[in-house]
């Protein structure tokens, strides 16, 4: 926290006056990140010029591009906080849990639409597919960070599209 305050040239007292605690600051950062993620997801969800599987593939591709353009710094904050904070902080764990469930629900809503239009497989429920897609999104970036390489991320994009695409009769 001290290095953040020093870089921002903000006195510690001003920080605590505004946020009250490190935890409150963490929640504010998380909420801002979730707002940005929500807008990015919505920009792909709202595209009716693409079938649903390609919308989610495009969403993942844009996440990958941002990750690569940022020098691997713009990975999923949710995943990072889950790994670093949730085991030791019940409040963060609960907020992260609710956030992941909201993200999964938004994916499932889109997948339901895709199933109704015949664009998305009906082999699994939209809820199950939403869970799988979320795990693929998270796991791909965790792997990229851990392995120190991004080469498999386009394969994750392709796998999302392949998983979701309804077989043609």
Image (cartoon, rainbow, N blue to C red):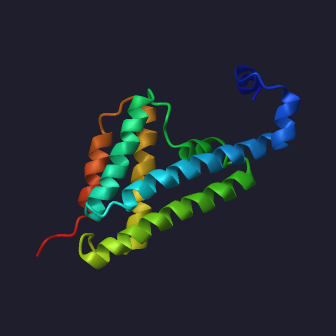
Q: Is residue 63 left or right of residue 122?
A: right
Q: In this view, does 90 lie above or below 79?
A: below
The location of residue 77, given as percent across then percent down, is 56, 43
Q: How many numbered discs, if any?
A: 0
The residue closer to the viewer here, 39 or 169, is 39
In the depicted view, which residue is nearer to us: 129 or 57? 57
Within the image, what quadrant is residue 114 found in?
bottom left
Q: Residue at x 74, y 42 (%)?
A: 25
- At which x and y percent is residue 121? 26, 71
Q: In this view, does 126 lie to the left or right of 106?
A: left
Q: Which residue is drawn at 70% across and 48% down?
A: 27
Residue 58 appears in the rendering: yes
Q: Work out which quarter of the rendered image holds the N terminus and state it.
A: top right
**Left or right, residue 116 beside residue 41:** left
Q: Which of 32 and 125 is in front in this view?
A: 32
Question: Would you place residue 122 above or below residue 145 in this image?
Answer: below
Residue located farthest toward the bottom when viewing the structure as drawn: 116
Q: Going 81% across and 42% down the picture, which residue do you hit?
A: 19
Q: Kindly tell me whether residue 124 is visible in this rendering.
A: no
Q: Position of residue 146 (x, y in %)?
A: 45, 33
Of the 4 image quadrants, the one containing the C terminus is: bottom left
Position of residue 39 measured from the top left corner of the image (x, y, whole percent): 49, 53
Q: In which quarter of the image is residue 96?
A: bottom right
| Residue appearing at x 67%, y 54% in the figure | 93
Residue 45 vs 167, above or below: the answer is above
């Amino acid at each position: 926290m001290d290095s953040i305050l020093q870089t921002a040239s903000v006195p510690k007292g001003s920080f605590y006056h505004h946020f009250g605690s490190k935890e409150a600051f963490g929640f504010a950062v998380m909420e801002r990140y979730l707002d940005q993620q929500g807008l990015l997801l919505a920009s792909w969800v709202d595209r009716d010029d693409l079938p649903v599987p390609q919308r989610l593939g495009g969403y993942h591709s844009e996440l990958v591009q941002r990750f690569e353009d940022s020098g691997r710094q713009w990975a999923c904050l949710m995943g990072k906080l889950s790994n670093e904070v949730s085991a030791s902080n019940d409040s963060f764990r609960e907020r992260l849990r609710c956030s992941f469930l909201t993200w999964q629900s938004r994916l499932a809503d889109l997948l339901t639409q895709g199933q109704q239009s015949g664009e998305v497989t009906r082999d699994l429920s939209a809820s199950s597919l939403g869970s799988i897609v979320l795990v693929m999104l998270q796991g791909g970036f965790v792997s990229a960070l851990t392995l120190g390489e991004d080469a498999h991320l386009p394969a994750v994009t392709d796998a999302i599209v392949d998983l979701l695409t309804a077989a043609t009769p």
